[in-house]
């Protein structure tokens, strides 16, 4: 027995020595080769950054025609010229990746505040079971909380999910068939049924012809966003772990909830999908916005359709104006931690055809009109066919007497008013929500001598309106959905 214990002790001692040798001489090389995300953490340590921004391609993606390639984090840093700010940006990253990055920043570093990108899309099956997951998870093996030598053995034996593209797809399809909504007023039982119905009934162009490309894009919005975030969602667990880690390190934590293309989602799919948008948004705001030491920056509805680079897919890739809008909103949250360092660079300029009437106004019986955008006939360019309108709204009671109005005055002085009832799914509990409309620019709009756009409250109950956002654009080009798309005809009644 004694000899056995001695042998076991010798083996353990040898393993300790081997682990020390590996950790000292070989581990860093393997990290650079197999887990290059750790180099991002090392860079912000070396630069003595006080604020770090963790993001995926939404941070650094730009349009092909853009001359300014600066990141959201770069624009944000402009507001704090005396505070060193760095970013950890890795395409396709999500909360689990961010967690591992943060773990490898020592508590003794200069980091004080952590900004973590929060993508609504990352909570859905299409991202959780993405074909990129095998490569991403492989990068995390060497970063596990085990001795370095153990992690190297785990990597050698491929201790991470290894699946073919078809196997990842099958996991997605299982969720589309089996995850049920069970939400009052939502007519769909699961994604498969909803997707099949949208594909069958389709999207029709101005000539009454079915547009298969736009129909496919509408189906993809359903497949991307039609889910309900719950406590057992793996991304929720990752974000919870980030909260706990930042508390242990004493870091300020900001979750930066990114903007999704609510304009296009509403235009192509409508109120049912907007209901799920709001349900999931509220889950995240409630779960994390009420925690001590955690701030959630809600950018969810702030970026208009014209500022999204990818018009044939669902991404959080923004043109410069969109990136600046996100940065401007984030900087206001960071100002709470660095009030003496905040400087407004006054760099947020609206593109041609984009009007933002900021501020807050209360509409009641005596003052029923919101801030008003007034345009003349020469303000509307010939290539503009559509206009996206959005605003934030807060009301405790029914919204059925609140409308968005487009008032037109023709050359004879005759006035006509087009009115649009505020979205029925807008919150009625006294909290801020958003409304969005996509309107055609018809002949009367184009020939009007003067056009006014505003919100009108007909009820006795006060309504608050803020940030009336109007963006003109061409009718979007025919969408060419990428080959990654799943065929809608594969689904019928969840089978």
Image (tube, helix red, strand yellow):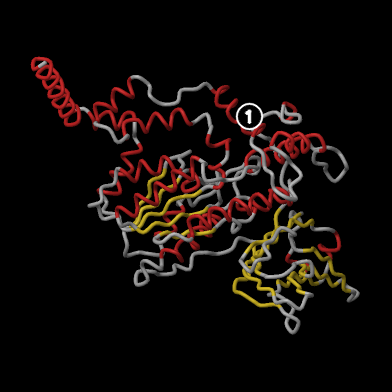
Residue at numbered disc 1: 173
Q: Is residue 412 above or below residue 284?
A: below
> What quarter of the picture does the C terminus occupy?
top right
Residue 356 percent coordinates (x, y): 62, 67
State how many labels appear: 1
Q: Residue at x 51, y 58 (%)?
A: 324
Viewer-nearest residue: 45 or 71: 45
Q: Residue at x 58, y 28 (%)?
A: 171
Residue 46 percent coordinates (x, y): 25, 48
Q: Is residue 195 left or right of residue 240?
A: right
Viewer-nearest residue: 65 or 46: 46
Q: Residue at x 74, y 78 (%)?
A: 368
Residue 358 occupies quadrant:
bottom right
For numbered disc 1, what is the local secondary structure? helix
Q: Residue at x 39, y 48 (%)?
A: 242
Q: Is residue 215 left or right of residue 71?
A: right
Q: Residue furthest bottom?
A: 366
Q: Is residue 25 left or right of residue 298?
A: left
Residue 71 percent coordinates (x, y): 45, 51
> What quarter of the picture does the N terminus occupy?
top left
Is the residue marked by circle 1 packed among few (<14), some (14-19), or many (20+) residues within 10 Å? many
Residue 163 percent coordinates (x, y): 50, 22
Q: Is residue 40 above or below residue 449?
A: above
Q: Is residue 140 above or below residue 423?
A: above
């Amino acid at each position: 027995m004694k000899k056995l214990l001695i042998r076991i002790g010798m083996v353990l001692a040898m393993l300790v020595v081997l682990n020390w040798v590996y950790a000292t001489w070989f581990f860093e090389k393997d990290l650079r080769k197999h887990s290059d995300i750790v180099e991002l953490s090392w860079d912000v340590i070396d630069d003595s950054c006080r604020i770090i921004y963790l993001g995926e391609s939404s941070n650094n993606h730009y349009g092909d025609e853009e001359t300014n390639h600066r990141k959201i984090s770069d624009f944000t840093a402009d507001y704090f010229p005396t505070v060193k700010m760095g970013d950890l940006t890795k395409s396709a990253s999500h909360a689990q990746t961010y967690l591992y990055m943060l773990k490898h920043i020592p508590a003794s570093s200069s980091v004080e505040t952590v900004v973590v990108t929060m993508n609504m899309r990352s909570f859905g099956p299409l991202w959780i079971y993405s074909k990129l997951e095998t490569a991403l998870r492989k990068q995390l093996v060497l970063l596990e909380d085990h001795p370095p030598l153990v992690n190297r053995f785990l990597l050698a034996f491929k201790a991470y999910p290894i699946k073919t593209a078809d196997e990842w797809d099958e996991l997605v399809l299982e969720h589309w068939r089996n995850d049920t909504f069970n939400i009052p007023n939502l007519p769909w039982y699961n994604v498969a049924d909803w997707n099949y119905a949208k594909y069958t009934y389709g999207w029709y162009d101005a000539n009454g012809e079915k547009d298969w490309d736009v129909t496919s894009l509408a189906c993809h919005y359903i497949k991307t966003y039609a889910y309900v975030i719950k406590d057992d969602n793996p991304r929720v667990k990752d974000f919870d772990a980030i909260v706990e880690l930042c508390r242990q390190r004493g870091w300020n934590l900001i979750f930066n909830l990114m903007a999704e293309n609510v304009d296009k989602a509403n235009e192509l799919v409508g109120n049912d999908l907007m209901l799920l948008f709001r349900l999931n948004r509220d889950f995240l705001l409630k779960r994390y916005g009420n925690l001590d030491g955690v701030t959630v920056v809600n950018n969810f509805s702030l970026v208009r359709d014209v500022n999204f680079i990818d018009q044939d897919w669902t991404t959080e890739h923004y043109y410069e104006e969109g990136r600046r809008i996100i940065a401007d909103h984030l900087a206001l949250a960071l100002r709470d931690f660095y009030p003496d360092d905040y400087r407004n660079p006054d760099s947020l300029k609206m593109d041609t055809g984009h009007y933002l009437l900021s501020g807050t106004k209360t509409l009641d019986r005596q003052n029923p009109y919101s801030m008003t955008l007034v345009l003349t006939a020469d303000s509307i360019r010939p290539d503009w066919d559509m206009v996206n309108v959005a605003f934030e709204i807060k009301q405790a009671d029914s919204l059925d007497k609140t409308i968005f109005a487009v008032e037109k005055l023709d050359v004879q002085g005759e006035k006509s008013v087009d009115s649009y009832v505020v979205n029925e799914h807008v919150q009625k509990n006294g909290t801020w929500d958003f409304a969005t409309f996509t309107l055609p620019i018809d002949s009367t709009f184009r020939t009007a001598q003067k056009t006014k756009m505003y919100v009108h409250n007909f009820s006795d109950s006060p309504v608050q309106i803020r940030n009336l956002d109007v963006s003109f654009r061409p009718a979007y080009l025919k969408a060419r959905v990428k080959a990654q798309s799943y065929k809608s005809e594969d689904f019928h009644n969840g089978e």
